[in-house]
Amino acid sequence: MKLFIVACLKDNQEDVQQLLIQANIGIFSITDMIGFKQNNGANLLENWFASGDEQFDSMFVFSFTTSKNVDNCMRLIEEFNTKSQSQFPIRAFVVPVEKSI
């Protein structure tokens, strides 16, 4: 079992949901977040409360799924990113689950 995490702009929510469904990941959770991007390279500790220049409505998608489904979805996301050429591509991460009950 793997914990699959996808981060994207909220504008891509429907695209991400379709990619998950195509990869046979039918159960997932979504949480909203606000992302900040600072272009001045300042010390992170001096800007702890995210007083960045730009603010983006983003989301995280979480799912516990199989390695096969993760591989399928990663491939689909990579294809999507290549076609869209977005400045803000969809990001995906895989975390192994060592134990569960």
Image (cartoon, rainbow, N blue to C red):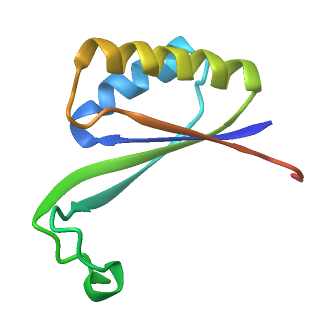
The quarter holding residue 78 reads top left
Count of numbered labels shown in the rendering: 0
The residue drawn where x is 27% and y is 41% is 9
Report the side of 73 relative to 56 (left or right). right
Q: Position of residue 83 (x, y in %)?
A: 28, 11
- Residue at coordinates 26% horizontally, 42% vertically from top-left? 10
- Indicate the position of residue 87 as horizontal and vertical percent values: 20, 34
In this orientation, which residue lies closer to the viewer: 38 or 90? 38
Residue situated furthest left in the rendering: 53
Judge from the rendering whether residue 31 lies leftward or rightward of residue 53; answer left or right. Answer: right
Task: Looking at this view, name the residue that lies furthest to the bottom.
Answer: 46
Which quadrant would the N terminus be assigned to in this image?
A: top right
Looking at the image, is 11 positioned above or below residue 51? above
Provide residue 11's location: percent of width, then percent of height: 21, 35
In this rendering, the answer to whether 68 lies above or below 32 is above
Residue 53, by quadrant, is: bottom left
Horizontal side of residue 13 vs 7, given as left or right? left
| Residue at 60% across, 32% down | 27
48 lies above or below 4: below
x 33%, y 23%: residue = 15
Q: Nearer the viewer, residue 22 or 89?
A: 89
